[in-house]
Amino acid sequence: MSKQTFTPNKIISYFKTEWVVLLIVTVSGLIYNLGLLAGPWFEGRMTGCLIDILNGRKTFYNMLILVGCYVLSIAVVQVSRYIKRFYVRRFANNVNRRMKGILYASLVEKSRPELKEQGTGDIMTKAILDVDDCVEGMRKFTTEIFDTGIALAAYAGMLLYYDWRLALLSMLFPPVSYLLAEKMKAIVQRTGVVYKEQSGALSSATLDRAENAITYRVFGCEQQRKQAYEENLTAYEKAAVSANIWNTMMPPLYKVISMTGVLFILYFGAANVLGTGWKVWTAAIFTTFLSCFTKLSVKSSNAAKLFNAVHKAQVSWKRIKPLMNPVIENEKPEIRTVSQLSVRELTFAYPDGENIFENISLAAKPGDIIGVTGAVACGKSTFGKAFLGEYPYQGSITVDGKELGSLDRRQHAGIIGYLGHAPELFNDTIENNILMGENKNVSDYLKLVCFNEEVQAMPDKENTMVGNGGVRLSGGQAQRLALARTLCHKRPVLILDDPFSALDKDTEKQIFANLKKYMADGIVIIISHRLYLFPQMNQVIWLENGQAVTGTHEKLMQEIPEYAQLYHAQEGGSIYEQ
Ligand SMILES: Nc1ncnc2c1ncn2[C@@H]1O[C@H](COP(=O)(O)OP(=O)(O)OP(=O)(O)O)[C@@H](O)[C@H]1O
């Protein structure tokens, strides 16, 4: 099946894609299930043969041939069963992998605000539990369509052939177990949903404790958090127990109901053997009939189990379906040059919030470095984030006349480079954190950010593992590593949000000088609280009370007393200076 015709939000597409595997499952499943009929038939024959041997009509040799054929049929059945199971498992693994891949790609596509809104724990649960449940339902369906569907039809045919009245009478019971399973479906579904929700809440609570462990410890909130966590855990346990009870309690009951027909077979079957029933049977036929019915009942209880698994899968599928979007084929950024950046009357508000800033205008060309500053929480970071396109904005941001908001993801990523407050380092080597698959000389970028000497002094140099989120690095090292990554993946417009906040003044000056040279053909916007480099900026944006003043450092020194005051305070060695 070509990738064009694959529709990730349609279950049937997953079956179609695996058609080769499913064909093998079908062939081996048919051989296995039809071969199963040989069991009861041989068992009846062997009973008959035993009676004949006792009566002197047959010899041990006849029995030996019969047993030999029986064993052979079992061997064929078991080998086909093995093949079928192997390929059903392969089908499930392939689908699981594919679904998780699509889900992952779809999550990556989502904007960070959307992800945060949905809750990380909930999404993790979706990604793992729901896909697993859904695929398990598909696996059971694929297995049982043969193991149950075909086998049931074959057994029922055999029973009807030997005595249709007794067959109909005894076969009344399995459907009762189906109906019961159907009735129970709502409870199984409901408890399943509650279990999933609690599982998501527990994941979130666990993440919260892990991420904020130090804060809770330092502020003496451990007990309180532990209690909140325990409450989540208890709710999760209760939900898990309830879901499990309903899942596991019912199948044995279905089995008992299905097997009730045995009582009729014992009574009416015995009458048949004695010649007083609806049919005249030998002991061999009696055994075959009984054995066939037992197998049919067991199979029909499997059908009931299948109902539960499929319903559970439906619940999971409903939850993940909105996330099963077509995978983006090529996400490599489309890098291009920019000769003009123009911001006109840019106004921004977070959803349902007031304007953070209004009517900011600015024009920049390659080689420009623009400083953004202002009071605490005046909207500096928000101004930088407006370039990420995570939220809609009013006014316009154009690059060479093209509106940023109208570009697709690849075009956007090819123009805007961004380094936020969080370094977003992953548990890999320094080199891999910088290159991220690019084939470049890592030390060039380490030198740019004045980190090369420190790295060379480390025992594993560029191959040093940085730990999750860069925990094995100091704040300043993590910050420079993140900056090296941003510079390695150079874009014509770079937004750097407080990139030097953890560095000393001399290092900051040196990196700034390197940056100026390196980005001579690009535009850099630096958001910062520290102003001693601002005289070197081509333009400065001063943000205050939602309004912006744009100009050179000199102009702002003259026109904005707060700016001048802040600059002089830092020059004189205030608390801002490190
Ligand atoms: N995701 C968000 N949703 C809603 N409001 C937000 C969001 N992020 C920030 N804000 C609000 O926007 C305002 C500006 O925040 P922002 O982080 O842009 O300020 P800042 O000038 O960078 O702050 P700082 O000087 O502390 O770095 C603040 O009032 C903040 O509460």
Image: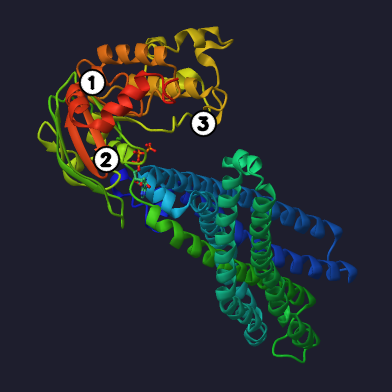
Q: Position of residue 64 (x, y in %)?
A: 81, 55
Work out whether mark 1 precedes mark 3 in sequence or the reverse, and give the earlier one: 3
Q: Residue at x 66, y 41 (%)?
A: 217
Element type at mark 3: helix
Q: Which residue type carries mark 3?
A: Gly
- The residue singled out by tag 2 in the image is 544
Q: How many marks?
A: 3
Which label number is shown at residue 537?
1
Is 543 in front, or is 463? Answer: 543
Using the rendered view, name the quadrant where residue 51 is placed.
bottom right
Q: For this view, does 263 lie left or right of residue 296? A: right
Work out whether mark 1 precedes mark 2 in sequence or the reverse, and give the earlier one: 1
Measured in 3D between alpha carbons, the distance from the residue under mark 1 to the one under mark 2, in whole angstroms, is 19 Å
Counting other residues with Cα less than 10 Å from the Cα at mark 1, is it few (<14), some (14-19), or many (20 or more)?
A: some
Q: Which-is-in-front pick, marks 3 and 2?
A: 2
Counting other residues with Cα less than 10 Å from the Cα at mark 2, is it few (<14), some (14-19), or many (20 or more)?
A: some
Which quarter of the rendering shows the C terminus? top left
- The residue singled out by tag 3 in the image is 469
Q: Is mark 1 within 8 Å of ligand 1?
A: no
Q: Determine if residue 197 is in view.
A: yes
Q: Which residue type carries mark 1?
A: Met
Measured in 3D between alpha carbons, the distance from the residue under mark 1 to the one under mark 3, in whole angstroms, is 31 Å
Q: Position of residue 220 (x, y in %)?
A: 67, 45
Counting other residues with Cα less than 10 Å from the Cα at mark 3, is it few (<14), some (14-19), or many (20 or more)?
A: some
Q: Position of residue 283 (x, y in %)?
A: 79, 76
Element type at mark 1: loop
Q: Residue at x 43, y 20 (%)?
A: 480
Is 162 in front, or is 77? Answer: 77
Q: For this view, does 229 lie left or right of residue 317? A: right
Q: For this view, does 573 lie left or right of residue 150? A: left
Q: Determine if residue 526 is in view.
A: no
